[in-house]
Amino acid sequence: MLQFKEEIRQAAKTALVDMIGFAGRDRFDGLSAEKNPFSLFPAAQTVIMIARRVTRGSLRGVEEGINFGDYGSFGKSWLADEFLAQSAYELVTFIERSGYEAMPLVPEKQVSVSGVARTVQPDFNYAAVACGLGEIGLSGEILTPRFGPRQRFIMILTEASLPADPLLDQPVCTRCGRCVSICPLQALDMEKAYNISICGKTMQVAARDEQQCAICKNGAVNGPNGVDRLAALCNRTCVDELEQAGVLSNTFEARFRKRQAWGKNEFGEAVEIVEGGRQ
């Protein structure tokens, strides 16, 4: 099956997938039935996680505070529902043409399953770590060594038993705490930080006040499936930090943060953002 795995990787490149990772079902044994993707496809043997980048330019309008609509399209809805979905469809059809059933799953979708006490909502952060693609940073977002927080994922379950990828062994999060200190609503709290362990990999995450995130006026997008924080001030600051720290392989000539960051309080009033950061 090693050759088939490589064929899937090549098919993913053709489908414009930026990242792909593999994990066997044994890596999900510690998950509850409500979070375990195998609750939705008991015959599956492998989880495949694919991702496409949130382009840095799609964050530019939010970073400058002058254009919020284009991120919603190119960084969120079109990227997830069209561009990445098309890549997933092409990869699923490739796997099924090879004789193995494959089920695509999107994040944040709850599915009612007979025999499970509650609805199933697969844990995508867990799966991204289990597939060796990244780690969970202080902010609670998946960080990858290629893009930091700038990607969106789709999961594919398949009956094919494919070799798992190794867990990511290099740190991505710099532990700088800028995501915590810069939030005008103080939604992240390091004093109540906790550890998450996935397949033996332990990551520290700051406690997050979801109610404060839900009223964030700093680039967060509140929708029916929760708050999307990829363009929020905390994660845009993370992009700047990881690029300045030199830990990302997707590099640019100019720094992401070109001037003092803007910020608003819970009432939408402008507030001064003061941070140390990297010069």
Image (tube, rainbow, N blue to C red):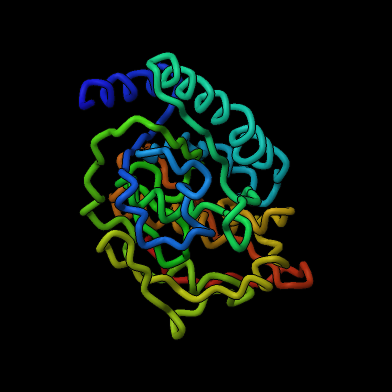
Name the quadrant containing residue 158: top left
Instruction: Identify the residue at horizontal 54%, vertical 30% (top origin).
Output: 84
Instruction: Identify the residue at horizontal 70%, vertical 43% (top origin).
Output: 67
- Residue located farthest toward the front when viewing the structure as drawn: 115
Left or right for 268, reference 228: right
Instruction: Identify the residue at horizontal 64%, vertical 33% (top origin).
Output: 81
Left or right for 155, reference 268: left
Q: Residue 19: give x, y in percent of width and height.
A: 37, 34
Q: Residue 174: give x, y in percent of width and height.
A: 32, 63
Q: Residue 274: give x, y in percent of width and height.
A: 53, 72
Say if 71 sits above or below 83 in the image: below
Say if 127 sits above or below 54 in the image: below
Instruction: Identify the residue at horizontal 42%, vertical 38% (top origin).
Output: 43
Q: Quadrant of the C terminus?
A: bottom left
- Residue located farthest toward the bottom when viewing the structure as drawn: 191
Instruction: Pick the residue in front: 134 or 88.
Output: 88
Instruction: Pick the residue in front: 238 or 67.
Output: 238
Instruction: Pick the residue in front: 237 or 10.
Output: 10
Instruction: Pick the residue in front: 274 or 121.
Output: 121
Left or right for 202, reference 253: left
Q: Residue 267: give x, y in percent of width and height.
A: 79, 72
Image mark count: 0
Q: Quadrant of the N terminus?
A: top left
